[in-house]
Image: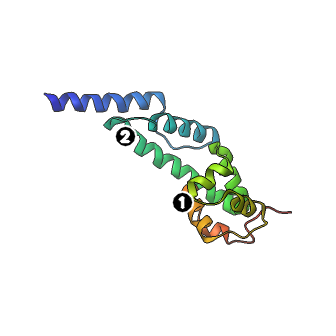
Amino acid sequence: MASTLRKDRVVDSYMKHIHAFALKRIRTAADHAAAKKVYLRLSGGKADQGTRQYLEVLVDLIADFESRMEEHAGSADITAAELVQHRLQERGMSVSELARQTGMQQSKLSEMLSGRRDWSKAAIRGISRMFSIRAERFLVGDGHPKQ
């Protein structure tokens, strides 16, 4: 009886999230922003099994959209620095916050983003992981904004 109750609660919380924000392929920047908002709201506290299962799928959908957008951006004439600036903006992050989360000095990161300094291996590694940007993006051309 107890396991049936637990399964019902898992299904109930999962379905509650589905009704609030359906799990479907993310196709637009607006859908992407909404999905990230849902993720941030749900991942902030203690989550039950249904919520964790919902978040697993939502994260996959967000990552898929970001990967497709990176491929699209890769075909355009966008530098790594511009892509990083875009990712910062869409996440509402500052350069200082990115530096803190990647263990870099803010001043050096700012110099890399502005083109006054070459990308370091540590910066490429940290930013690539955090923003799902392929490391090769930092090595194409000069990776910095056009002057």
Judge left or right: residue 113 versus residue 7: right
Where is residue 31 shown, x and y percent of the image?
Answer: 59, 38
Kindly indicate whether the residue at mark 1 contacts the one at mark 2 (C-beta within 8 angstroms): no
Label 2: how many Cα within 10 Å (few below 14, some 14–19, many 20+): some
Q: Amino acid at mark 2?
A: Arg
Q: Which mark is residue 52?
A: 2
Q: Which mark is residue 31?
A: none
Q: From the image, which quarter does the C terminus lie in?
A: bottom right
Q: Residue at x 59, y 65 (%)?
A: 134
**Secondary-structure class at tag 2:** helix
Mark 2 or mark 1, whichever is nearer to me: 1
**Secondary-structure class at tag 1:** helix
Residue highlighted by disc 1: 129
Instruction: Determine the CA span between mark 2 and mark 1.
Output: 22 Å
Q: Residue at x 42, y 41 (%)?
A: 55
Where is residue 133 shown, x and y percent of the image?
Answer: 59, 60
Q: Amino acid at mark 1?
A: Arg
Where is residue 123 shown, x and y percent of the image?
Answer: 62, 64
Question: Which quadrant holds residue 128?
Answer: bottom right
Q: Residue at x 62, y 49 (%)?
A: 97
Where is residue 9 shown, x and y percent of the image?
Answer: 28, 28
